[in-house]
Amino acid sequence: MARIRVRVEGVVQGVGFRPFVYGVASRLGLAGFVGNDGRGVVIEAEGEAAALDCLVDALSTQAPPLARVERVTVEPAAVTGLAGFTISASDSSGSRTVLVAPDTATCVDCLTEMADPGDRRHAYAFTNCTNCGPRYTIVRELPYDRPGTTMAAFVLCEPCEREYRDPLDRRFHAQPVCCPDCGPRLRLVSADSALMAGDPVSGAAGLLAEGAIVAIKGLGGYHLAVAASNEEAVSNLRSRKHREERPLALMVPDIEAARRLCVIDDVEEALLLDIARPIVLLERRSDAGIAASVAPGQRGLGVMLPYSPLHYLLATAHPDPLVMTSGNLSSEPIAYRDDDALNRLAGIADAFLIHDRAIHTRVDDSVLRASRGGPLPIRRSRGFAPAPLTLPWEFPRHVLACGPELKNTFCLARGRHAFVSHHIGDLENHETLQSFTEGIEHFRRLFSVAPEVVVHDLHPEYLSTKYALECDAELLGVQHHHAHIASCLADNEVADPVIGVAFDGLGMGTDGTLWGGEFLVADLAGFTRAAHLAPVAMPGAARAVREPWRMAAAYLDAVFGLQWPDAPTLKAFRARHETRLDQVLSMARAGLNSPLTSSAGRLFDAVAALAGVRDTVSYEGQAAIEFEQLADRSEPGRYGARIESSSGLVHGSDLVAAALADLDAGVAVPVVAARFHNGLAAVVVEVCERLRRDTGLAAVALSGGVFQNVLLVERCVAGLEAAGFRVLTHRRVPPNDGGISLGQAAVCGARDRLSC
Ligand code: ZN
Ligand code: ZN
Ligand code: FE
């Protein structure tokens, strides 16, 4: 007979961990108790040594679906001889290091209840249990208990209270538990806020079938929904929302419906069915029957499956695909407060399907692609945040990393945990900046982080940099592309030095020019810039991002100087830009409002514009995204570029010249696009081989927004692996600027470890 005291840390509260321990201990005939405290779950168990071993083993191998066990510590305790096993009440004392779980898709048990006409939760839109439902979006404060959530206002009825108190019930201590008698209710209201009669879900489904736009309150904010096959309704939504040409996401009832729209392999199926229920970018079928304006110029579609009970009810009432795009005007963050949503969306939505459970934190849908047999995150948000990344290294000090300007996330770190925030967005308006500052405060309280050092980008105009400079703490500036590579290293838990290839739109360099086509020799703590694309002018600065043809002009200038040959492609290009071309060229040559950049993203823009894909874009990277999609994947040819061994300069203009020659020779654009991708990948391999000869390093990390381009990733990985490199790509945070905050925190932690 022995007694042990066991501590379990990780995501172990609000996920059914205590009932699980109770069940295992009872089956094993053990005595003792299980309870929560500020650090996780505590167990004392008494019985035969073999049974105690079984219990400890089960903690990590049989934990409930939403639990994430990070550490189990066992120590001996004095035998008491008391019989029976109990669950003790929550203890809110002690330090707050409990982890709040992300929001999770409705589980099968709850769906079964909702489908059962005899169940008291039949067709109830707020059904949830310990294994599913809202978490992070409703948490106001810790401990994670009902009074600390936006469910505090709903008083449990007797049957719900019984379930909540019963250790053997699936809803034991499920904080959002409720039923039609005691929980939130749905309403359908018109654009002028009048309550509409009848069942809200079938009412909304009826309106959608007629082509109406319905705003729907989801887990992390409002969606705007419209029937995806109805061209008129979708273009109506686009024009009311001012959402230029960005693709709109779709929701379909189940995986079979998703297969009717897109080609889906095993990896993509697993991503769609993940309990986080992200939007997955898939290749569309030619017979998908989706309105053209859902994703203009795109070969793919962003698809997700229902994740809240309300979505399931709606998908049953309206089984055809729905556009489900975030409820906002294009530049604003997603609406999540009811009064605000009714106000801001009144000019867009014809009706509102709403309810009275408040959303505490605005959280957008996550977006993934499949790559290299697993996920490639594009946006890490709902369903993933705020689960921390647990790293194999300690952060000696508490860190706040403020992240970039666009696609902002921030990151708080302490111990071995890096808490990367949900997607905040582009810090370019008051509302987004407010969710940034409020989000940081919320995270600081939830995860008990008191930043001793604040990390920022080197770009002085980023609002996140300005926020950092006003913090009353030690400051650390981290170069943008070093942060990209560090985020990839942290993502892969690699601390050794690597060759880092950081290709993105723009980031401030240490020399005051804008970088973005960088080969770094880097580890977490530092880097040297070993090679990079030869800089060209960005005529008009920010305008050159919105007007890729300006980058084509700048690259043509680099290729030909003052003497442009008399070639058909150039004639066509001149004809399109007659009025402004000379002005733009003289601006670039004089260096007026034309900062230099080594950006790979801008190189993509230049070739795409030259190939006639598009001269202007309505969102950053649009030309490059479309260029990738139309590339002929069976084309093996590639362009070459000179690499200067002394300076490490890579002449991207050679790729432009080669593309131009092909276009003049009448080679089809998809072939040109493929040869450009293949050529750039070959350049990456060649530069890495040179750097391996110089440094002995045989691992390459690929990061930066350009590596959202799956074709480029595949070609680079294939070439690098064939050359004997180990290649690191992103799995947990995005390669784009959404991963910058993690990289900033990782750099800070590594420097702190060196100095102590
Ligand atoms: Zn459930
Ligand atoms: Zn109830
Ligand atoms: Fe970047």
Image (cartoon, rainbow, N blue to C red):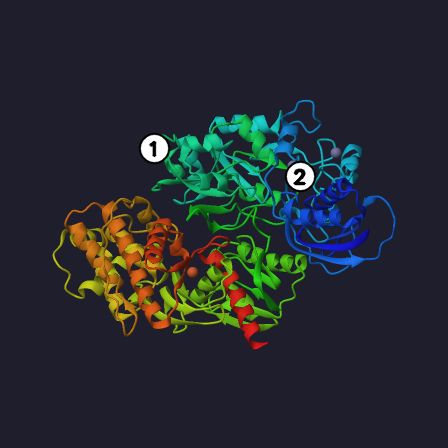
Query: Where is 532 relative to 667, above or below?
Result: below
Please rate how many residues cluster around mark 1, counting C-alpha atoms within 10 Å: few if below 14, some from 14 to 19, many from 20.
few
Considering depth in this image, is 194 or 320 the residue closer to the camera?
Answer: 320
Please rate how many residues cluster around mark 2, counting C-alpha atoms within 10 Å: few if below 14, some from 14 to 19, many from 20.
some
- Which residue does the numbered mark 1 point to in the structure image? 286
- Label 1: which secondary element: loop
- Which residue does the numbered mark 2 point to in the structure image? 356
> Can see residue 163?
yes
Residue at the spot x=47%, y=50% of the render? Answer: 377
Amino acid beneath label 1: Ser
Q: Position of residue 329 (x, y in %)?
A: 48, 46
Residue at the spot x=29%, y=46% of the render? Answer: 631
Q: Residue furthest top?
A: 117
Q: Residue furthest left?
A: 566
> Can see residue 550?
no
Considering depth in this image, is 483 or 582 the residue closer to the camera?
Answer: 483
Circles 2 and 1, Cβ within 8 Å, touching? The answer is no
Amino acid beneath label 2: Asp
* Circle nearer the viewer, 2 or 1: 1
